[in-house]
Amino acid sequence: MATSDSSNTSGPRVSEQTFSSYNQAQGQKYVQARHDYNPLVYQAVVEHHTSTGGRPDTLLDVGCGPGLAARALAPHFAQVIGLDPSEGMLAVARSLGGASSTGEPIRWERGAAEELDKVPQLAPASVDLITAANAAHWFDMPRFWAAAARALRPGGTVALWTSGDIRAHPSMPGAAKIQAAMDRHFEVNLRPHMTAGNLLTMGGYADLPLPWTKNPGDGNDEAANAVARQFDEAKFVRRDWAADEEFFVSNSEVNLDGFEKLMATVSAQTRWNQAHPELVGTDKDVIKILRREIEEALHEAGVEKGKEKLKGSVLGVLLIVKKRGVHDQ
């Protein structure tokens, strides 16, 4: 949800225009369709943060959307802030509430990732953990890292994760044919509506810029070098989830109605819908077409009509970056 110079006088200036423009109804559909992350994902974040000297005081969840990650991590921190540019997403987050370890309500603030250090009542170098769940691919990462460096306490942590590629689980009947149908759908129907952010998630954040990433033509950018020096590259951690590990709270089977609702929350699919409003919900809707192909594959594999279920393997990834401590500067 990166900022840009585009005109937006009513709130944060963002270049990501799909989720950031969600109204409350769309945000409600999003939170109903999306599974929460497996508790082991949150556990990995908290354990790494605390075991490397991180404090349990202030958590800032950036690109928080309806607040899944902020609420899940809130019991571990005294103060919790969720930040998002979408008023619709924040309206859902506020309706769902949440409280910190001290009982203090989660604060839901509107703002851009690249200006996270400008959250009201947030002192410089006061944040202990910054998180971004399936959101960092929308950020202007150099500006995000600069803001994170200003906001983080020495020894603080940045944890970024994404669900990465999602594959048909090999144990599912007709898995190979279903995967082929999914691949066609993404390549033929959705690829024209994908952005650089979508490609970053599909690549498992392999190309997500980190504080020390150098881009061709940057030259000797002293400001960028100053930001990079504040983070400890030697302590960088990347954890990849295997296909048989649960990245979401449940990678269990889902019926085809649930599958349609989930697919409708994919940003590239949302943009396809915006480009073809006259086809949405009709027999020519690409999600409906994909559903028919999946049904056919399941029936050919012996699944009875009315008992169609899908199961996926989510290749999630977690990136953890540490700000240097006082004695590491």
Image (spheres, grey):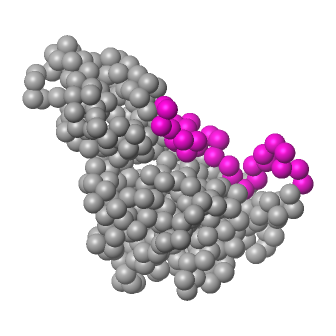
Front-most of residues 177 and 27: 27
Q: Note whether residue 86 is visible.
A: yes
Magenta stretch, main secondary structure, is loop
Q: Residue furthest top?
A: 300
Query: Within the image, what quadrant is residue 195 found in?
Result: top right
Horizontal and vertical percent position of residue 34: 32, 50
Q: Quadrant of the C terminus?
A: bottom right
Range covered by the magenta-colored residues = 191-220
Front-most of residues 55 and 293: 293
Q: Residue at x 45, y 59 (%)?
A: 20
Front-most of residues 307 and 139: 139
Horizontal and vertical percent position of residue 98: 33, 74
Q: Residue furthest right?
A: 220
Q: Residue at x 55, y 86 (%)?
A: 121
Left or right: where does residue 244 sit relative to residue 207?
A: left
Left or right: where does residue 93 sit relative to residue 283?
A: right
Magenta span has 208? yes
Figure check: 255 above or below 322: above
Q: Residue at x 68, y 61 (%)?
A: 143
Horizontal and vertical percent position of residue 198: 51, 41
Query: Within the image, what quadrant is residue 112 found in?
Result: bottom right
Number of numbered discs visible in the structure rendering:
0
Figure check: 116 above or below 32: below
Q: Residue at x 54, y 83 (%)?
A: 120
Horizontal and vertical percent position of residue 148: 65, 67
Q: Note whether residue 241 is visible.
A: no
Figure check: 290 above or below 4: above
Left or right: where does residue 52 sit relative to residue 106?
A: right
Magenta span has 143? no
